[in-house]
Image (tube, rainbow, N blue to C red):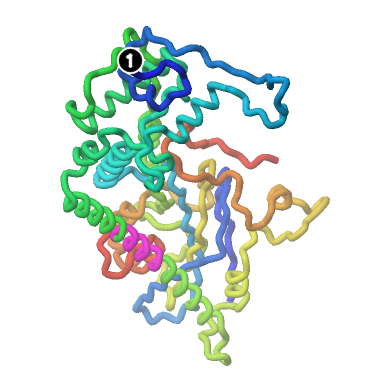
Amino acid sequence: MPRLAVSSSSATSLSLLSRPSSSRLPALARGYAAPPSQNPHLVVPADSRTDVLRGVLYPRDAYSPSSASPSGAHHPAHLDRLRAVLPSEEAHETIERAWRLFQREKRARRTISLEAKFKAMEEACDELEKMTRSATEGGEGKAPRYLYDRAMARARQTTTEGAKGKKATAESRWLEARIEGLVPREAWVPTETRGKGWKYDWTRPQ
Amino acid sequence: MSFNPRVLARSAGSASRSARRHASSSSSSSSSSAGPQVTASLLLSRPPLLTPSAHPLESAYYAHSSSVRSALSNPAPTQFYFKPGSLPLRRFQRSQHQHELETFGPRLAGSAPDVGDVPGEAPVEEVARDHWVKEDSERGEKSLERWPEEEVYCLVKDGKRWSFPSTTVEKGEGLDEATFFLRSHILAGEPSIPQTAGWSGHAWLSAKEVEEKLRAQGDEKVWEAVKGMFGVAEGDVQA
């Protein structure tokens, strides 16, 4: 016969699910005061809430102390439920292998795509380097060297470095207020859903 | 050789440039004595807005994995999370039973819990993932909501010909023409083409659409040279 006291939480937790709503457990009892004989610093409050918590963390009918479950408890029909979801070991292995294969193919496609992009970039830089190297140094000398130098250095949007006072343009002021190389604050991370549409009438704040 | 970069008109867009350029050297077979031309083209793209949709296999696997997890999980400690006899507890018991019924079948789920009268919850308004695409559909190819899960690129129209916006617009042939690409991202706003540029329109196209357009107007060589930037490797067939 399950006790109605809250301390035997684990015994009553499962029976609660099938209990009609009219039955009630006693209200949570909280006890703070220490008896005069005891040291108040060493008293653990007789709190039914703590008992409930203890019952949740360390269930009475724990499956085993060294089980994989953190509190050692399982659903009473956990093996049947598992069998309902995974009919056989082969089924489980097939599902896992299919998933890993899918992931591997996805990763391979992504890697190939990324390598193609990098290769295009590398070839472009090599081409520019060759074009801008003078004929005396073995290049083609078709374009001035500063093109390559500027391309290899971190690109700046304005050439007016540190333009102040009268020379400060809107663009240079905009750049001054921001840390170079930092991801711009208008950038975003793709999300599941969007609350707002694209802002077509955005203008740079002055 | 003087290289005069003309400022590309982009009035209301915010962009952060990367220092990388790509070369697409289209070697024409002419033997004219014109000097070498270096062209700078812009690859302006809008990064994807939404996370990619789940593949059917992914959805199936996640559902299966959740079922296994709930089969092995501890029984929910309702006495800790809910007050006895409360409405949230009754809603939870009902939804638990529903979930067990769907996952494990009627035999293992058992009989439905006697929860009495449970008032309905407030309905959650769900917005479809393509809501903004549909809202903005009247802009057609100029819409920046197109292909929210993909990166879309800007192409400009010169008469009837679609191309990447570039500074040196050469009409005649050139020996050893090389086009270098600047990558740029649009973060807000819209590009506006001034009168001086000479382009009649623009469009935001996904990588596949860019390929289709270039092939349709006979620019297969341009596509072959440029496809690396879009992540299409040699010998790859774009899906």
State the residue in front, B34 or A38: A38
**Residue extent of the magenta highlight:** A105-116
Q: Is residue B109 above or below residue A23?
A: below
User: Is residue B31 among what the camera can see?
Assistant: yes
Q: Amino acid at mark 1?
A: Arg
Q: Quadrant of residue A112?
A: bottom left
Q: Check the residue under mark 1 and report the chain it is in.
A: A
Q: Residue at x 23, y 29 (%)?
A: B102
Residue B205: x percent and y percent? Answer: 37, 49
Residue A83: x percent and y percent? Answer: 20, 41
Residue A106 on the magenta span: yes
Viewport quadrant of the N terminus of chain B? bottom right
Q: Residue at x 24, y 56 (%)?
A: A97
Q: Is residue A113 left or right of residue B83?
A: left
Reading the image, the residue beneath label 1 is A19
Q: Main secondary structure of the magenta part?
A: helix
Viewport quadrant of the C terminus of chain B? bottom left
Q: Is residue A200 above or below residue B181?
A: above
Q: Is residue B85 left or right of residue A84?
A: right
